[in-house]
Amino acid sequence: MTIDLSILEPELASWRQHLHRHPELGFQEHGTAAFIIEKLRAFGIEEIHTGIGGTGIVATVRAGQSDRGIGIRADIDALPMTELRASDHMSVVPGVMHACGHDGHTTMLLGAAKYLAETRNFDGAVHFIFQPAEEALGYSGADGDRDGGASAMIRDGLFDRFPMQAIFGIHNRPGLAAGKLAGRAGPMYAAADRFEIVITGRGGHAARPHLAVDPVLVASHMVIALQSIVSRGVNPLDSAVLSVCKVAAGTAFNVIPETAALAGTVRTLSRATQDIVQSRLEEIVASVASTFGAHAELVYERGYPAMHNPPDMFARVREIAISLVGEEGFIDLDEPTMGGEDFARYLEEKPGCFLLIGNGDQGAGAVMLHNAHYEFNDTVAPVGAALWATLAERFLSKTSC
């Protein structure tokens, strides 16, 4: 039987808009966590564990006698951005907004928890994982973790305390028709690394450059040279991105500064390509600086790994998704995205699958993620909630051994 949760749309929309109005940054989601806990208790869920990975929550709904279990994850954090899209539920927190749809992801998981707590038409345990700090790559706050919330929850014993055979996640995708589901086997998201370079030369008068070692000139050559890594150092059939996104130097128009700084990101789909790019970056930074008589220090940090959907697991989840939305409602993606997703951390530990849900292919729904005018499409929340409910009932079927 197909699960239809469209009747929940007004209620889900009210939850989502509350979360949107009160966004919180990674590892600071205390109000968000309190709201989630309030709803879970209202659903009659008694097994609620808090403080996992900082502000993370795991709630468990059990039915039957089986010791099988699955995990379903939603990210709950927002971004340090000022919202520009006016609405009656726009962010009231200065400089913080839900610009990636995590408010919608949280709402969909709450909707599934409500349904499954009422029906319990499965045999086993469903662990609802509300994860902090998916956006926290590079976060360095006192209570933070550079690797993000997934790593923090794993270190706090997620898989030891809550035994599960598989874990699942989803992300909304602007540009994809509202409510359609999508995915692919194999690589789906890229590894997300970051680098910072500080070049030290010798400052001086701009009119006497021969008496200085100009770090701006060194930085300029370095930016150009780094672009050769992908174009000439990586197999053309592999995927890699290297972007220098920050250049900083100088205080006056007539002063050659002492230092210059560069920062950027590297995205790759395989560990081997990641190793190649990092190695070549280290070599180029050192050699270019040396050529001009300068010194350079490189800090290279590996962030979220590439995320790959296991083919067998993807095939099973795809079949379940199609049973919900029909063949026309599921899109097999031709290529991965070079964005990063810390759900990859879970898939290093457990089998699982990650899908996309369409946010809309026109109007407000098509505004891209991390945009100040972005907003999650409330009409797709019942589809996401129904997907999780269907998946739980199928993976933990009462008739399965």
Image (spheres, helix red, strand yellow):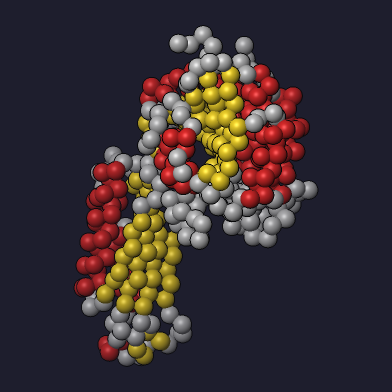
Residue at 43% across / 25% down in the picture?
165
In this view, the residue in front, 248 or 50, is: 50
Residue 114 in the image: state x and y as whole percent: 67, 28
Residue at the limit of the structure toward the right, as seen here: 88
In this view, the residue in front, 80 or 130, is: 130
Residue 74 in the image: state x and y as whole percent: 56, 38
In this view, the residue in front, 162 or 210, is: 162
Asked whether residue 335 appears in the rendered view, the answer is: no
The image quadrant that residue 200 belongs to is bottom left
Is residue 193 shown left or right of residue 330?
Answer: left
Residue 40 lies, with reference to residue 202, above or below; the image says above
Residue at the limit of the structure toward the top, as seen here: 399
The mark total stands at 0
Residue 356 lies, with reference to residue 391, above or below; the image says below
Asked whether residue 345 appears in the rendered view, the answer is: yes
Residue 231 in the image: state x and y as whole percent: 29, 51
Residue 71 lies, with reference to residue 145, above or below; the image says above
Residue 132 lies, with reference to residue 173, above or below; the image says below
Residue 322 in the image: state x and y as whole percent: 53, 19
Residue at 42% across / 87% down in the picture?
254
Residue at 43% across / 35% down in the picture?
160
Residue at 57% across / 30% down in the picture?
60
Q: Quadrant of the N terminus?
A: top right
Q: Quadrant of the C terminus?
A: top left
Is residue 129 shown left or right of residue 311?
Answer: right
In this view, the residue in front, 385 or 182, is: 385
